[in-house]
Amino acid sequence: MLDDDTFHRLGHAERPSMQIDPLDDHLTIEPTSDEHETRGGLIIPSSAEVPVRSGVVLAVGDDVQGVAPGDKVLFPRAAGLEVRLGGEPVLIVRRGDLVARYVD
């Protein structure tokens, strides 16, 4: 789970009262909604025609390795299950569905 400093640094005013703790090899991701360019120049498109999405890892299950809360990741558009947490979309994704981690 993200600590409060990281949560606020990512642009969130307050933490939702409900929490999702992923199990086993699952993780929760806050998907990015708009096309954006990272500081390093990687362009992440928002078009549904592009098969990749990006997001920020919020929490990881006990069996997840190589990814930590706060990491920015890429994953297939069709991956995961979308739920709402505090009115905001959150994805529950298997670790094996992640294709890359990036730093901007």
Image (tube, grey):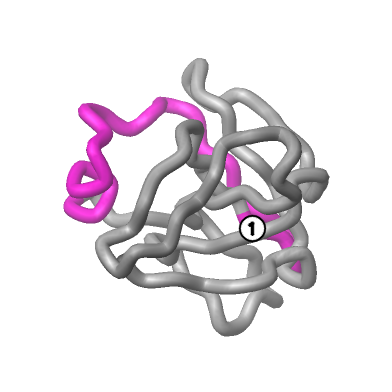
Above or below: residue 62 compared with residue 44: below
The structure residue drawn at horizontal position 40% and vertical position 27%, both measured from the top left corner, is 16
Taking the magenta stretch, the answer to whether it contains residue 20 is yes
Q: Which residue is situated farthest in the top direction here?
A: 87
Name which residue type carries label 1: Leu
Residue 50: x and y, percent?
Answer: 70, 45
Corner quadrant of residue 31: top right
Q: Quadrant of the C terminus?
A: bottom left
Which span is picked out in magenta?
5-27
Q: Tell me which corner region of the image, top left, top right, bottom left or bottom right, holds residue 96.
A: bottom right
On the question of residue 24 being in view, the answer is: no
Q: Residue at x 59, y 61 (%)?
A: 74
Tell me what residue is drawn at x 36 percent, y 52 percent: 37
**Is 39 on the left-hand or right-hand side of 81?**
left
The quarter of the image holding the N terminus is bottom left
Of 29 and 39, the residue lying toward us: 39
In the rendered image, residue 26, in percent from the top left (x then y), is placed at 72, 60
Residue at 50% in and 51% down: 44
- Residue 13 in the magenta stretch? The answer is yes
Rendered location of residue 24, percent (x, y)? 75, 67
Task: Quickly name the residue at label 1.
Answer: 27
Secondary structure mainly formed by the magenta segment: loop
Task: Identify the image quadrant of residue 45.
Answer: top right
Q: Is 34 positioned to the left or the right of 52 in the image?
A: left
Q: Position of residue 15 (x, y in %)?
A: 32, 33
Which residue is nearer to you in this view: 58 or 42? 42
The reply to whether residue 28 is visible in this rendering is yes
> Local crowd at mark 1 within 10 Å, few (<14), some, or many (≥20)?
many
As helix, strand or loop, the secondary structure at mark 1 comes to strand
The furthest residue to the right: 78
Front residue of 87/102: it is 102
